[in-house]
Image (cartoon, grey):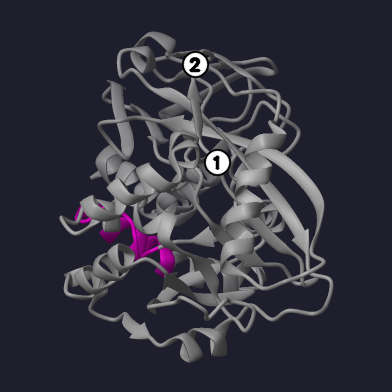
Amino acid sequence: MQQPADLVVVGAGIVGLSVALAAARRGKRVTVVERNARAIGASIRNFGFVTISGQKAGEHWARACRARAVWQEVAEAAGIPILHRGLVMPAYRPEAEAVLDAFLATEMGAECRRLSASEARAHVPAIRATGMRGALWSPHELRVESRDAIPRIAAWLEARHGVSFRWSTAVTAISGTRITTSRGVIEAEACVVCPGDDFASVFPERIAAHGLRVCTLQMLRVMPAAAARFGAAVMSDMSFARYEGFAELPEAAALCARLDAEQAEERRMGIHLIVVQSADGSLVVGDSHVYGDAPEPFAQDRLDAMILAEFDRVFDLPGRQVVRRWCGSYASASDRVVLVDKPAENIRIAIVTGGTGASTGFALGEQVVADLYG
């Protein structure tokens, strides 16, 4: 039998690490159990884009604001570079411009402002000015390199907060205070399961009751032919019609209708544009959204082509080259943005169900731990 813990966290993705941090800050002895030798799922396959503006209004937007504050603390403490800050969202269609202006009038837009084309290009010189009707500037966003940040957070939690990690260890059963793993039994007063899009390994019947799906997305790493400075993340018209903080505004209905008519296939495949920059000058570009009962193992060239076509509509970067392609997957639900389930008084299941784990996970972790110990 392994050393007892106050809390066992199942899963070492961003949500699991967030729960571990929140519990460790309360003085709890925490053990994280991860079935893989390292984090390999959605938490390292994303943009590393901590997105605030565009999150669903209300509690989820508040989660993102809180998570951003924690990200700043953790990044400094763990030595994680913040590669750039802020978001530029150019609007090329009048319907997108109307959404932009409507967002600025909301509580969420209070610290944001409208940019002219020349001001947008001051942040990101490669953005096409022709046809741009204006752009949203959000100062809130942070960009980290997820594939580096996640292992650094784990190492920092171990070194600074005494969190214990059990890598390459599968949890096979949880009953009361007994967590049975492929490498022995751990006794703990509480347990939080953070399974990502693994709906079958632990508490499958409880997860199945919520009707979750798996969303598979395709992403690209693009290298500009010449040096190109991105001083902020970039999204555009398609994102104004996709992110709930924009798309649920009444003014978005006209934009959605126009996009459905002009880019029907892209809309069906969940294409929209996010572009962020890495330290080597390359760009992480995406993405698409295909839903099913399991991750889609095979990428489609057609989806990459649609993503790149949207990229070329927004940026003037001739000669750009795709240097890497990959797929990611995450849990998705049509009726919620997070799922917190309670199999027992001392057990929780915590899942971000909309691809916003990097943006909201730290806040969700605090909420779950407060519920357990509050």
Residue type marked 1: Ser
User: Above or below — where is 70 with respect to 285?
Assistant: below
Is 14 colored magenta in this rendering?
A: no
Q: Nearer the viewer, residue 72 or 230?
A: 230
Q: Which mark is residue 288?
A: 1
Q: Which residue is at 73% across, 38% downward?
A: 38
Would you identify the image quadrant in which residue 255 lies?
A: bottom left
Q: Which residue is at 64% across, 78% downward?
A: 126
x%, y% of residue 176? Answer: 38, 16
Is 68 colored magenta in this rendering?
A: yes
Q: Which residues are magenta?
A: 52-69
User: Can see residue 268?
Assistant: yes
User: Above or below — where is 318 with respect to 263?
Assistant: below
Badge nearest the viewer, 2 or 1: 1
Q: Going by the picture, which residue comes out furthest to the top?
A: 205
Residue type marked 2: Asp
x%, y% of residue 228? Answer: 73, 79
Relative horizontal placement of residue 348, taking residue 98 as reference (left or right): right
User: Can see residue 160?
Assistant: no
Secondary structure mostly taken by the magenta-highlighted segment of the chain: helix
User: Above or below — where is 269 with respect to 59?
Assistant: above
Q: Which residue is mark 2?
A: 293
Name the N-terminal-most of marks 2 and 1: 1
x%, y% of residue 134? Answer: 38, 80
Q: CA distance from mark 2 to mark 1?
A: 17 Å
